[in-house]
Image: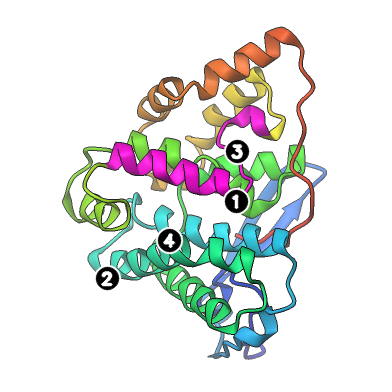
Amino acid sequence: FVPIIAVPTTAGTGSEVTCWATVWNEAQGKKYSLAHPRLYPETALLDPELTLEKPIGLTIATGLDSLSHSIESIWNVNANPISARHAVAAARLIIQTLPMVVRDTGNLALRSAMAEASLNAGLAFSNTKTAIAHNLSYPITLGWGVQHGIACSFTLPTVLRSVIGIGGFREAALREIFGPDLAAGADQLAEFLNGLGVGTRFADHGIRFQACADIIEEAFVGERGKNFVGTKESFIAAAQQQEVISQLQSHETQGDHMLSSPGEESKQA
């Protein structure tokens, strides 16, 4: 193996501190991960100036990928109190900073904060891998062209609702991010995403009811679905409560044509 020196140009995938590479098979509609200890970079160099010229769409998508990494590492069977510390630090900083970066893309201090958050998110999920939101996202990216960071983040409010009551250090970490009332926190997270132009229903991304049902079923039997501390039943109940599924069914009945999210993003884990 050739030693890897990683210099991230987005904030970001956190791949400068993880041991994974990804292969996307568009013909088969599958995403595969490669893992090996030698894929850990020997050196990681963070220079936030390299992110200054990134367009708003890419900034949002990669920032939300980092947010997903951090939160997914908490509702994860592989989580531990140390990984949770990194996750909380990352998520809080992203929620605080990303909307400001979108309004002021050339602000080096804000870009530096996002680089730090992405690094912390990488350190968090390098211990745990990702979970259900990521497993839901892969067919959505491959089948509907939704950017990876958008696809793995728009379900976060629903997943958060579904894990209320899990207890222990995981719930404590989520409360540090979203406050003592996690139901209200899920609403605030949805508002945060909406404020960045990201809808939180499957239908917002062009996914009709039957396809949605198939995606959910498949996601919970995959590896990352098994990393999730919650259940398929709790996720579906939370989705129904927020009219995610019924909204899809309504659109399916009406025969509406949905709009998929525009733009391109590097398809990384």
The residue identified by callout 3 is 199
Q: What residue type is labelled 3?
A: Gly
Q: Which of marks 3 and 1 is in front?
A: 1
Which label sits on residue 14?
Answer: none
Q: Which amino acid does label 2 sit on?
A: Ile
The residue identified by callout 1 is 196
Total labels: the figure holds 4
Q: Which amino acid does label 4 sit on?
A: Ser
Q: Can residue 1 be seen in this view?
A: no
Task: List the single residue furthest toward the front.
Answer: 103
Q: Nearer the viewer, mark 1 or mark 2?
A: 1
The secondary structure type at the circle numbered 3 is loop
Quarter-wise, where is residue 183 in the image?
A: top left
The secondary structure type at the circle numbered 2 is helix
Specify the segment rendered in magenta.
Answer: 182-204
Q: Distance between the residues labelled 3 and 1?
A: 9 Å
Mark 4 surroundings: few (<14), some (14-19) or many (≥20) residues within 10 A:
many
The residue identified by callout 2 is 82
Depicted 246 relative to depicted 132: above or below: above
In the image, is 95 to the left or to the right of 38?
A: left
